[in-house]
Image (tube, rainbow, N blue to C red):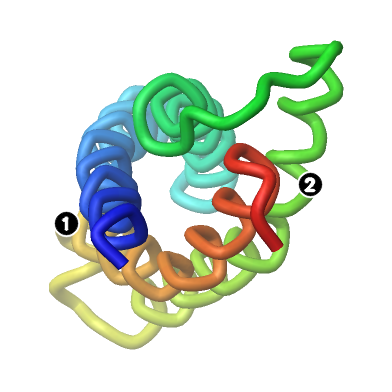
Amino acid sequence: MASTFRSLALFCVSGGLALLVDIGVLYAFKGAMGYYGARAVSFWCAATFTWWFNRSFTFQGVKPDSIWAEYLAYLSSMVVGGALNYGAYVLSLQAFDAVRAEPAWGVAIGSLTGLAVNFLSARRILHKQA
């Protein structure tokens, strides 16, 4: 139980740091790509960061023969959580003036929405637990 709590706590730290990556990249690219295109890029950057952080600190399980295979499996598993994340971002951007004024709020809403699904997926891939 303590191991699961530790993993969840570190996963949340990873998510908080990734939120900063996500927002930073969104703001860097929103002028050139708009809110929706920039969000796709920012999500990919944040997911890549969480893969690195979680494999390095959160889930220190058996490492695969191919780091690229692990990376692709991790990103693929994030698709469901990512779809929930992006969907919540889009809905909040369309529904709330405050989110349109500061899209970082939409990134935060999306991140919280995908958290549980992504934790279970990451744990399965990076820690080799079903």
Q: Position of residue 76 (x, y in %)?
A: 79, 47
Q: Which three-letter amino acid code belongs to the residue tagged 2?
A: Ser
Count of marks, rendered view: 2
- The residue nearer to you, when weighing 18 against 56, is 56
- Kind of element beneath mark 2: helix
> The C terminus lies in which quarter of the figure?
bottom right
Tell me: residue 94, above or below residue 14. below
Closer mark to the observer between disc 1 and disc 2: 2
**Residue in the image at 59% along x and 43% along y:** 40
Q: Residue furthest front?
A: 1
| Residue bearing the label numbered 2 | 76
Residue 110 at what x, y percent from top left? Answer: 39, 67
Residue 96 picture location, percent across and down: 25, 82
Q: In which quadrant of the rendered view does residue 33 lie?
A: top right
Residue linked to disc 1:
102
State whether residue 26 is above or below residue 111: above
